[in-house]
Amino acid sequence: MNTNISSNAHSLSSLWAPLLLIVGGLFLAGCGATAPVVQSVSGPDTLETDETGTFEASINEAEADDPLTYTWEFGDGATGSGLLTNHSYSSTGQYAIRFQASNEGGSDSDTISVRVVPPPQPASITSINATPNPVDEGETVRFSSNVQGDTPVSRSWSFGDGSSSMSQSPTHTYEEPGQYTARLEASNDVGEDTRTVTVRVNRVLPEICTTVSEMNSAFFDRNSSTLTEEGEESLQENADILSDCPNLSVQVEGFAAPGERNVQSLSEDRAEAVSSFYQNNGVPGSRIMTSGQGQVEGITSKKGGTRQYRRADSLPQREDDGM
């Protein structure tokens, strides 16, 4: 009986031995896989936001056993795969980039960093101002601007009258009335920009331009619309005022005396005679309005005896009076 048991045990031992050798060999084979070794990781030191950078790694590919897995972590929550990959950053900052290679035998990793900066900003003029504007001739104007872009930024001003400046916020005085276009050119290493501002320079008016309320009348001979020498002398003072005062226009009203012929047309002709005199003395026709008032009615305060009815009045009108 004992002999049979011993015989059976020997038979089972003969069957398990090869099986154990096979399983052990497979186990030893797995444990012997060559793990990857990261030899290098490279990429740009600096990137601009939204600029794509190329990142590359190398391992001991000749020795490391397949299958191999490659993983990139870019520090902004994004990942990648492969030995060669691309990535861009939407925000500035310093980012740590980790590469890892792994297989059944183990894993290895290495880390590099990249600095992400804003892209170059060319000079850009966002606003340009002149204060005060309008300005009187001889009064100082201060120019200012808002310029964005990478520093250093250079500025070049031209004021439209032949003068210029390189100052950031220059001042300038216009000696003559008129309309001037001031120009600013701003530039840096990556670009330039130009903008203009129009400056209106007003003439400094004599005091009479703002105070005059009455002008000389011209008196005519009976039934005549021809200016006398005395009438022209009276009107010359008016013409001088109108020439010196661009803020003034004039309403010319002609009158005829009772008993004169064709009083309406005569009064109109007298107004036109005064208008022609003014225009011949440099007053623009656009600043002269005429009307014939026909026969004088009632009593007039004009000096000149009975001829006061044979006249043309010049009524000054200022722009600030609504004209």
Image: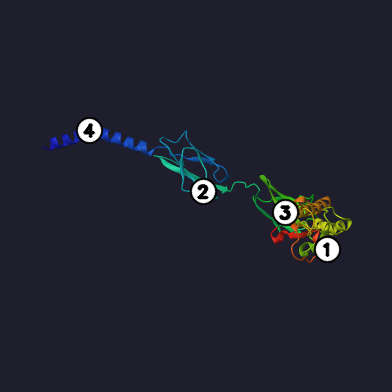
Whole-Å distance between the Cαs marked 3 and 4? Answer: 109 Å
Identify the element where label 4 is drawn: helix
Upstream in the sequence, badge 3 or badge 1? Answer: 3
User: Is there a contact, CB below 8 Å, between mark 4 and mark 2?
Assistant: no
Identify the residue under disc 1.
Answer: 306
The mark closer to the camera, 4 or 2, is: 2
Amino acid type shown at disc 4: Leu
Identify the residue under disc 2.
Answer: 96
Q: Can residue 165 be seen in this view?
A: no
Circle 1 packing at 10 Å, graded few (<14), some (14-19), many (20+), is few
Upstream in the sequence, badge 4 or badge 1? Answer: 4
The residue that appears at 20% across and 35% down in the rendered structure is 12
The mark closer to the camera, 1 or 2, is: 1
Identify the residue under disc 3.
Answer: 199
Q: Residue 49's x, y, as percent?
A: 55, 46
Give the position of the C terminus as an image quadrant: bottom right
Say left or right for 41 vs 270.
left
Q: Residue 79's x, y, as percent?
A: 46, 44
Identify the element where label 2 is drawn: strand
User: Is there a contact, CB below 8 Å, between mark 3 and mark 1?
Assistant: no
Whole-Å distance between the Cαs marked 4 and 1? Answer: 158 Å
Give residue 15's mark: 4
The mark closer to the camera, 3 or 4, is: 3
Upstream in the sequence, badge 2 or badge 3? Answer: 2
The residue that appears at 33% across and 35% down in the rendered structure is 26
Identify the element where label 3 is drawn: strand
Q: Residue 4's x, y, as percent?
A: 13, 35
Amino acid type shown at disc 2: Ala
Upstream in the sequence, badge 3 or badge 4? Answer: 4
